[in-house]
Amino acid sequence: MSLLALDRITKSFGAIHALQGVDLEIQPGEAVGLMGDNGAGKSTLVKIIAGNFPPTSGHIAVEGREVVFDRPIDARAAGIEVVYQDLALANNLTAAENVFLGRELKKGWGPFRTLDKEAMIERSSELFAELKSETRPRDLVQKMSGGQRQAVAIARTRLSDPKLVLMDEPTAAISVRQVAEVLNLIKRLKATGHAVILISHRMPDVFEVCDRIAVLRRGTKVADKATRDTSPEEITGLITGAIHAA
Amino acid sequence: MQPDVPRTTDHAAIGDVAGIEERTLLQKMLTSQPFWVTVALIVVCLGIGFYQPAFFTAQNIANITRNFAIFGIMALGMTCVIITAGIDLSVGSIMGLVAIVAGIYLTAEYSWYVSFALGMLAGLACGAVNGFLIAYVGLSPFVVTLGMMSIARSLAVVISGNQMLYQFGPDAPIVKAIGQAKFPPNVEGDMWPDWIPAFSSHFWVMVFMALIVGYVFKYKAWGKHLFAIGGNEQAARLTGVNVKLIKFQAYVFSAFCAAVSSLLILGYTGSAINALGQSYELRVIAATVIGGANLLGGYGTAYGAIIGAALLEVIRNALLMAGIDSNWQGAFVGIFIILAVFIGLQTEGGRSYIAQLRDTILPPRRKDR
Ligand SMILES: Nc1ncnc2c1ncn2[C@@H]1O[C@H](COP(=O)(O)OP(=O)(O)OP(=O)(O)O)[C@@H](O)[C@H]1O
Ligand SMILES: [Mg+2]
């Protein structure tokens, strides 16, 4: 039984048909690379899986059961965590506050339940250390570098024990060393039975960690192949349209 | 300081950035607008006190703190709304409606608590309508609260029959006692020395509410969510913050603050007029902005709201004492508002002018790592 199964998902924004009948299945412990040109519909697909907005038509099933996500927290409750392409950070809050936004740790009792800042700061610095990031929990996100911001967004997905992690270009702005850490994280997630969807324009990253690669072109899935059965050249051709389908 | 756009950077650069961000408490204080407003307040007070020793009498201090307390209270509510990047133009009119509704019931000889509760209910209803239309229907805060400003005022005029209400039935003494209560009482022979001002109930209510709001901003998830909405509403929604509910509550709280202020004034004057609070919304917004809240959302403090209200009142008081024609007040208040927005203004590199000033006085320390 698939962990996640998308069945003929379409999404239209007025006259724009961002997705036109996309099927996709993911098994536990699997990493799928989702590739495609700018505007191919990758982020749109991620946002649908994450409960950001509903598909125009089509069905989503998690572990064989059909689900309808009205809000992002519904998807999170179903075990889906997301690193959004724009990172979804509040600039006026600190790194730790952003990591725990919407699921703050609290202490105390009744109306006097207060934020457990110390615990949140401690947990955040553990997560940043795990990502080998020089991000400090008390710093305002506003003043952070692109890589530090990315670390904050990724650290969020580590708060729960999700079944599926969606990463929309998690390595777009980070250093070589940190890219390696993110790829390591994906491998660890796989090894512990988690599934990952990785969206990236970086061919080597996708080939290093993904078991399967799906290619979107203008809202349609034109390929879905095991990584060992394809090559960067073929994927490039599929993305640009030089190769029609595979 | 780094621009807030994500950019590619290698590992060494990240270390450098981290070093620059080390700041002392003093440096932090020097960037905070409430700090500078406090300095301005002290300077203005000392200035007036120098020319007019009467300024520092217990009586005058009690008066000033009573006068600005209602603006401070409303500025607390306005701060919550402005932090979410909203605005509430209806607070002055809500004051008028609350006073008239409470006044009508008092005149009809209902008990003070029934009358106050019904007045409060009318105010909260206005806030709930604002909040519903803004948070759930998605209308613009400016337009909705502008509409409510007109509606609530009109209702107040209609309900009052355009009469002043002042014959408050059997509970009139209790109503007055609430509005005119003082602590310390400063009567002959009490334990408090005379130089301590007899602070009004208005002042103490403001202090109490400011402490609660300050506590909520700092220690409650609700406060953090309020700031997150102002910082990046979309991000707040995606991370599971109940954006609509919290925005709704912010407008209800703003209306609550207006209702509390209204009832205090009703008690103090022992009368209700439908024009109560007219144009107060501007003074409240001014106090909030002077105190450092950012109209674009995401920033604001309870202390700033109070200190902004205090500064406005002290300036007004100073102009009066200096014998300047009261028609000039508007001009001075306007200058202070623009000045406050200017020093809090973010320059291109994401720095405010006070941040630049701070870096000139105290250059950032680079930590060796
Ligand atoms: N909220 C929206 N309203 C209208 N059109 C949208 C919206 N979101 C996406 N689109 C359109 O849908 C199409 C697919 O966009 P999407 O963001 O999914 O592309 P992408 O594959 O993630 O591209 P990139 O690699 O640049 O991130 C684009 O044509 C885009 O303009
Ligand atoms: Mg995208």
Image (cartoon, grey):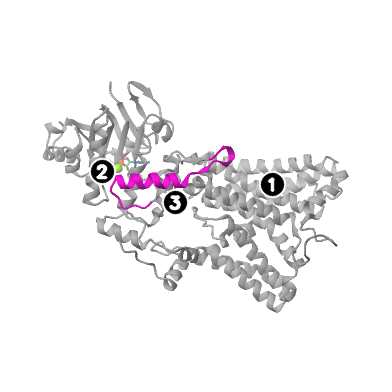
| Label 3: chain letter | A
Q: Secondary structure at mark 3?
A: loop
Image side of residue B188 versus residue A218, left or right:
right
Ligand 1, seen in the image, is in the quarter at top left
Quarter of image, res B60: bottom right
Report the disc number at residue B127. none
Report the disc number at residue A182. 2
Q: Is residue A115 magenta?
A: yes
Q: Is residue A86 visible?
A: no
Q: Are marks 2 and 1 on the same chain?
A: no
The N terminus of chain B: image quadrant:
bottom left
Q: Residue at x 65, y 67 (%)?
A: B330
Label 3 lies in ligand 2 vicinity (Cβ under 8 Å) = no
According to the picture, the residue beneath numbered tag 1 turns out to be B152
According to the picture, the residue beneath numbered tag 3 turns out to be A93
The answer to whether marks 2 and 1 mark residues whose Cβ atoms lie closer than 8 Å is no
- For marks 2 and 3, the one nearer the N-term is 3
Mark 2 crowd level (few <14, some 14–19, many ≥20, 10 Å Cα):
many
View extreme (bottom): residue: B51
Quarter of image, res A120: top left
Where is residue B87 drawn, in percent x and y? Answer: 57, 52
Distance CA(mark 3)–CA(mark 1): 36 Å
Image side of residue A183 versus residue B240, left or right:
left
Image side of residue A67 versus residue B263, left or right:
left
The C terminus of chain B: image quadrant:
bottom left
Q: Which residues are magenta?
A: A108-136
